[in-house]
Image: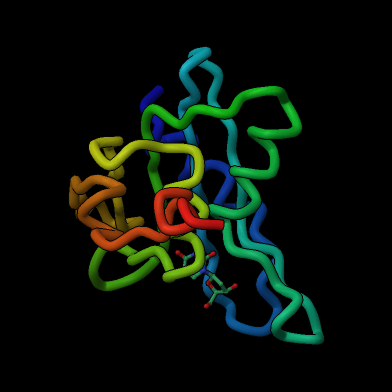
Amino acid sequence: MSLMDDARAVRERAYVPYSNFKVGAALRASSGTVHVGCNVENVAYPEGTCAEAGAIAAMVAAGDLDIQEVAVIADSPTPVSPCGGCRQKLAEFGKADTKVVLGTTDGLLIETTIGELLPSVFSTEHMARS
Ligand code: THU
């Protein structure tokens, strides 16, 4: 089973009564363990969480801190593009060259990296004088 298969499976559990847009994310950690997440919306809209954020929370809770590969899937015409906040969250635990596969439910795939998704990442280097 590929990492995208894991993302596809967890996507089915997304809680999306407001957008009706289900997203699934799967992360392979350096330990080899796969952590998954789906988007979970809320009637107070800004309180909803993205699939990627859910997968990262599951990963950290399980004791992993290094992302080796990411897969994200949605039923979109073109492969889903992680939001800006999730790009920064992925950068916290991955590297610039960490592989990210973005997919659609009908099989389109794009392969990119965390660095391509967020070229000017905010990092601890920016806080060097503090
Ligand atoms: N969403 C994600 O879960 N991940 C993304 O990469 C893009 C957007 C969710 C947030 C919200 O529940 C729904 O998709 C519509 O924005």
Q: Is residue 124 above or below residue 79?
A: above
Describe residue 69's horizontal placement relative to residue 124 as left or right.
Answer: left
Residue sitting nearer the eye, 120 or 128: 128
In the current view of this chain or complex, which residue is farthest to the front?
129
Q: Is residue 81 above or below residue 60?
A: below
At 60% from the left edge and 43% from the top edge, which residue is drawn?
56
At 58% from the left edge and 77% from the top edge, which residue is drawn?
20
Query: According to the image, what is the colour scheme of the structure?
Result: rainbow
At 52% from the left edge and 13% from the top edge, which residue is drawn?
31
Q: How far across and down, in percent of the image, does residue 108 sit? A: 20, 55
Q: How far across and down, in percent of the image, does residue 38 sit? A: 61, 54
Residue sitting nearer the eye, 35 or 7: 35
In the current view of this chain or complex, which residue is farthest to the right?
43
At 36% from the left edge and 27% from the top edge, which residue is drawn?
2
Q: In this figure, what is the number of numbered marks?
A: 0
Q: How far across and down, in percent of the image, does residue 64 sit? A: 62, 24
Q: How far across and down, in percent of the image, does residue 10 sit? A: 58, 44
Check the picture and name the quadrant holding the C terminus: bottom right
Check the picture and name the quadrant holding the N terminus: top left
Describe residue 46's horizontal placement relative to residue 113 as left or right.
Answer: right
Residue sitting nearer the eye, 44 or 5: 44
Q: Is residue 58 above or below residue 16?
A: above
